[in-house]
Image (cartoon, rainbow, N blue to C red):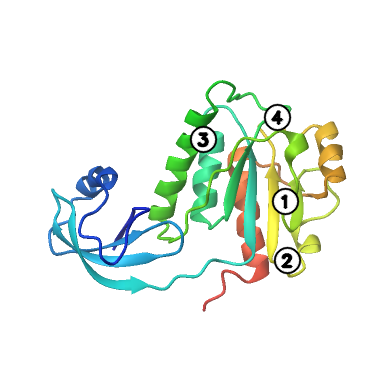
């Protein structure tokens, strides 16, 4: 079944949100087929589509969903092109808990004067990724931060190819992890020192140096695999 997002959806709803009608039309779902609509905060309901053009729906059942553990908070540095957006998309599909955009020292991209528009763009990417991966909880995109504003929730990890320890050496049944990923030029040594002073621990992902678009998702996947989140339930 295809998934949709409507923050106001309830079992009593009789119409899909107007914003989702274009998505509905692009999928060519026929009347009588079932769809899932989530409110983005844990609730997901199955509806039968009555009229695809009008978006009228009839409630069938509610689904029970649970979040993956540990909870992972991604701090993603702004990057040129669409590399940071690619990181957001893949990280949400992998079940990240929240996303914080970070104006790093070496970030080529800059949101100055367009912060809300840029953050809204990330939010739309997160919504699309949530629906694609059939999750009922939307990872919020938090306000843009500077390095001095970063503080870890749970275990704080900052990805660095020069770090001494890897993921397997640092994870120890942590329920919450904050993961910091630098821009295309990497995180400066001054920023590394500052982040360590703020409670983060440098961590590397093996011998390879990954792009900013893949480093975060790779680390998230590694954390989930090492913590048993991918084991069959």
Mark 2, residues whose alpha carbon is within 10 Å: few (<14), some, or many (≥20)?
Answer: some
Asked which secondary structure carries label 4, the reply is loop
Camera-near label (3 vs 1) is 3
**What is the C-alpha distance between the residues marked 1 and 4?**
17 Å
User: In the rendered image of this protein, does residue 199 appear above or below residue 177?
Assistant: above
- The residue identified by callout 3 is 119
Determine contact: label 3, label 2, CB under 8 Å.
no
* Residue plotted at (76% across, 64% down): 171
Camera-near label (4 vs 3) is 3
**What is the C-alpha distance between the residues marked 2 and 1?**
18 Å
Mark 4, residues whose alpha carbon is within 10 Å: few (<14), some, or many (≥20)?
Answer: some
- The residue identified by callout 1 is 205
- In the picture, the disc for residue 174 is 2
User: Mark 1 or mark 2, which is nearer the start of the sequence?
Assistant: 2
Mark 3, residues whose alpha carbon is within 10 Å: few (<14), some, or many (≥20)?
Answer: some
Asked which secondary structure carries label 1, the reply is loop
């Amino acid at each position: 079944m295809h998934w949709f997002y409507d923050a106001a959806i309830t079992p009593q709803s009789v119409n899909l949100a107007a914003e989702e009608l274009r998505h509905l039309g692009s999928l060519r779902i026929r009347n009588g087929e079932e769809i899932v609509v989530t409110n983005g905060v844990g609730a997901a309901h199955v509806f039968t589509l009555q009229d695809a053009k009008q978006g009228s729906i009839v409630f069938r059942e509610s689904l029970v969903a649970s979040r993956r553990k540990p909870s992972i908070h991604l701090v993603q540095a702004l990057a040129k092109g669409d590399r940071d957006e690619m990181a957001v998309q893949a990280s949400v599909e992998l079940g990240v808990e929240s996303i914080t955009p970070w104006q790093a020292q070496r970030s080529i991209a800059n949101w100055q004067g367009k912060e809300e528009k840029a953050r809204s763009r990330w939010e739309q990417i997160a919504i699309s990724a949530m629906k694609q991966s059939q999750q009922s909880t939307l990872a919020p995109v938090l306000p843009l931060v500077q390095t001095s504003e970063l503080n870890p929730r749970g275990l704080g990890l900052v990805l660095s190819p020069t770090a001494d320890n890897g993921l397997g050496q640092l994870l120890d049944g942590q329920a919450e992890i904050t993961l910091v990923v630098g821009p295309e030029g990497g995180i400066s040594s001054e920023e590394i020192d500052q982040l360590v002073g703020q409670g983060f621990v440098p961590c590397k992902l093996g011998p390879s140096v990954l792009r900013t678009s893949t480093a975060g998702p790779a680390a998230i996947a590694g954390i989930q695999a090492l913590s048993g989140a991918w084991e069959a339930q």
